[in-house]
Amino acid sequence: MQYKWRVLSNTTVATLMAAIDTNIVLISLPTIGRELPSTSATTLLWILLGYSLLTAVVLLNFGRLSDMFGRVRLYVLGFAIFTVGSLLCGFSQTGLELVFFRLVQAIGAGFLFANSAAIITDAFPPNERGRALGINQVSIVVGAVLGLVLGGIITSTIGWRWIFFVNVPIGIFATVRAHYDLHEIVKPSEAPHIDYLGNIVFAVGLSLILLGVTFGALGDVGPAEGIGMGVTGLALLGLFVYVESKEASPMLDLSLFRNREFSGSAVAMLLNALARGAFSFVLVFYLQGPPRFLSPLTAGLFLIPVSASLATFGPISGWLSDRYGPRWFLLSGLLVSAAGFLWLSTITADESFLSLALPLVLVGAGMGLFAAPNRAAMMTAVPPRRRGIASGIGTTFLNSGTTISLGITLIVLSQVLPHAAIVSILLGAPTQTLAPGVASGFLESIHVVFLGSAVLLLAAIVPAVLRNPVRPHLPAPSAAGD
């Protein structure tokens, strides 16, 4: 097999696994809350948020480390850590243990996400990158949605612990294969240097925002404390940008944003992530909570149209963008997804599978049309030796946007529902224990969230299409290796 196809198959398995685990836990949360001892609503949220948060925090640094020490070396290490973390998650005995072991998983996922796009870009010639990155990057989005389907099936049949155990044999095989099959094409060019101050400021800032949102929404702290934590977190993120502008070897290389193609792709990716980040979270609790109260299996089946449309349109969009350029695929993807979210903002309490499938297909198709051309344009716009940090920036924007989107959704919920009702929904309380009006209030908040998603997607059109054509910084095609 040509080397480039070995790269694509291995990295796609890696990103698919890591993306599946972003959401496979989500559909199992009500079951975990009932069956795992010492699990509160806050703990349940941080089983989900902790993984996304830490992945977002480490990605920038891991992308830079890969430019220093070698992308393949750290990619293989990430696969091994992710596999060990999955095994530990399956053996968790309390909610806090599961939160901690999910953080181990997240470190491994950070290495995988930070390096996969860079390794693919190194291995494929320019005229094939869109298709290759399309398959790989769509696996991230498909995996996030597919995780919901698989999580529902596994939880309903053999138990929630197996959503983690199934990763172990796949992870062992893929780690060994990556070690023996992959090699460095672009050699490390930088002396090792860790931006400690930047890491600390970014991690604390993003963490404070999420802590303020989750604790405030669930009543763990008062409104003043929650707002104070959020404002402090935002101030620290502003300080982070200043720190990086003064750092000789920053974890966030601001010089890359002077390239309009790169910066336009990054901003569009961030807005897209903010728009769709809470999509799965909202739908899972719409289907499993008030007003539907479906089983995890049935809820997962309802979400198949999103995965199917993503898997169909993602690779096609990547392949066609190689030939015709990314601009019109980005525009059409954002418009189609926005139409789907506008439709979802009108759903009722008793939608049939078919009536819900139609807007879900639009959302999935739009995501597929957008993801691959945008990432390909972003990676092609930077020099080969900067692709590690460029890949890290892209996926950090994606994960940060997704994580913050969940926080915004909790804020919306807290404005419509009392703290006790939100806790009851998260813990999977049966319908007879919910106070009157909770179901209608929850549906109202869903409409607000999806309407906001449509607005963000329309806003993403501006940076997506108003940018310079790509001027690739590429090695000779022979560098792809056969």
Image (tube, rainbow, N blue to C red):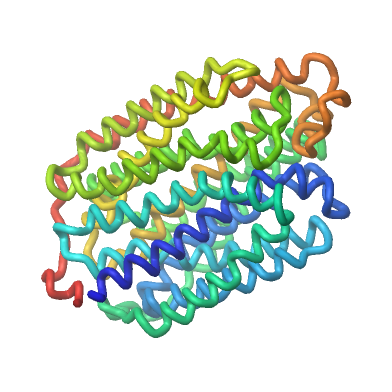
Left or right for 42, reference 170? right
Quadrant where the N terminus sits is bottom left
Q: Residue furthest front?
A: 157
Quadrant where the C terminus sits is bottom left
Residue 475 drawn above or below residue 217:
below
Residue 8 drawn above or below residue 182:
above
List x then y, in percent, for residue 284. 63, 36
| Total tally of numbered discs in the picture | 0
List x then y, in percent, for residue 331. 26, 32
Instruction: Name the residue at 72% across, 64% down.
Output: 90
Residue 300 drawn above or below residue 352:
below
Is 381 in front, or is 348? Answer: 348
Instruction: Name the residue at 36% across, 34% down.
Output: 366
Instruction: Name the residue at 82% across, 25% down.
Output: 431
List x then y, in percent, for residue 18. 52, 59
Left or right for 458, reference 2? right
Instruction: Name the residue at 13% across, 43% down.
Output: 324
Q: Tell me where residue 105 sits by quadrant.
A: bottom right
